[in-house]
Image (cartoon, helix red, strand yellow):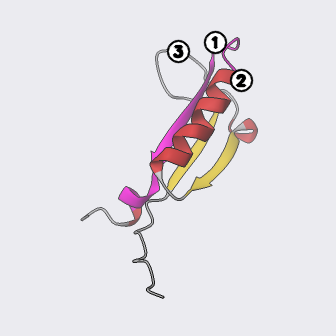
Amino acid sequence: MTAEPEQKQLLHLVFGGELSSLEGVTFKDLSKLDVVGVFPNYASAHTAWKAKAQATVDQAQTRYFIVHLHRLLDPDS
């Protein structure tokens, strides 16, 4: 049995909340941020982001974001 090569983790954070204004990314209340989670790849982060974004479609001031944590952890890559 051969071991499969381990794929590099490309961590992504999904979070969101109500914005103060639609013209920026300043949150109205940081204590109410919704941290959805940390995901091992972009595809799973996008799935989680899409579900949250669709669930809050009627709340115009609420936005969700995907942060590429792997770029922060290893900026030279």
Tell me which label, 2 or 1, sits earlier in the chain.
2
Q: Between 31 and 74, which is closer to the camera in this rendering?
A: 74
On screen, residue 56 versus residue 72, left or right, reads right
On screen, residue 28 versus residue 31, left or right, reads left
Residue drawn at 48 percent across, 54 percent down: 41
- Secondary structure beneath label 3: loop
- Secondary structure beneath label 1: loop
Query: Measured from the top left, where is residue 53 in percent x and y?
Result: 62, 26
Q: Between 33 and 39, which is closer to the camera in this rendering?
A: 39
Q: Is residue 55 above or below residue 73?
A: above
**Which label number is shown at residue 60?**
1
Residue drawn at 55 percent across, 50 percent down: 13
In 3D space, how far apart are the residues under numbered discs 3 and 2 (Cα atoms)? 18 Å
Magenta stretch: give its range: 56-72
**Which label number is shown at residue 55?**
2
User: Is there CB contact under 8 Å for labels 1 and 3?
Assistant: yes
